[in-house]
Image: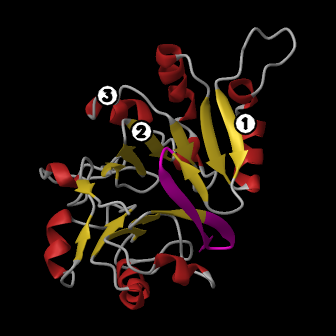
Amino acid sequence: MKITILGSGTSTGVPMVGCRCRVCSSDDPKDKRTRASLLICHNGRNILIDASTDLRFQALREDIERIDAVLFTHSHADHVNGIDDLRGFHFLHKEIIPCFGSRATLETLEAGFGYIFHEHDGSGYTPLLQPIEVDGSFELFGLTITPVPLEHGRTRSLGYRIDNFAYLTDCSSIPEPSPALLKGLDVLVIDGLRWTPHPFHFNIESAIAVTQPLKPARTVLTHLSHDVLFADGARLPPGCEFAWDGMTFDIRTT
């Protein structure tokens, strides 16, 4: 199973428009961050986690030719506003793409993008995506997908565990019983927005603290803001690192 970080940035992306800080002005390509999303490749199938605002650019950059399913973490704009770019994949392979998420997330998506999910009388638009509510673990293309309930400030989001890999973006707490779902990971990718505290996201210190009892072999911090210089990853403890756009992992499957 191959994992690709399509986007490692927060909702503004990095550089942030109009900003001239040291990160936004950095020449390091790893400080150029599109909005957070991820691709899973397994047995010739591509599973996307979140349709970020930058999906079209990410797909062109990584030469992605098809998307076979989408897992949505929540309905915030930076994670769903690229949904219209999924139409291109449908036009190529003529298959309705299943999209998985919580009931609240799917209701928001269907309200905002109803034309892409349902055929409306007289519209001429046919369904391109199929909404499927997640209410427990399920099988997808030979992989077991386990949703991991998370707290994102005062709202909820979903992380996902896929075999020995887990992706937890946009979270400020891992409530019970979710920690038990995150044991024995080879790689954990988790929200680590910035160095200073934030009410809706783990900061770097709290992300490291919450992962230590889970003991993943490797921890990767994502959803990074323009407060985080990639080179400052040298300050992180062993086994912990910053994500960057285009970063890949090969994960053993059970």
| Residue lying furthest right | 121
Cα separation, mark 3 vs mark 2, equals 15 Å
- Name the front one of labels 3 and 1: 3
Q: Main secondary structure of the magenta part?
A: strand
Report the residue marked by disc 3: 60
Mark 3 burial class by Cα count in 10 Å: few <14, some 14-19, many 20+: few
Query: 236 or 248, which is in the foreground?
Result: 248
Helix, strand or loop at mark 1: helix
Cα separation, mark 3 vs mark 1, equals 25 Å
Screen quadrant of the C terminus: bottom left
Report the residue marked by disc 1: 112
- Across and down, in percent, residue 53 comes to 48, 40
Helix, strand or loop at mark 2: strand
Residue lying at 27% horizontally and 35% vertically, measured from the top left: 62
The circle on residue 46 is: 2
Colour theme? secondary structure
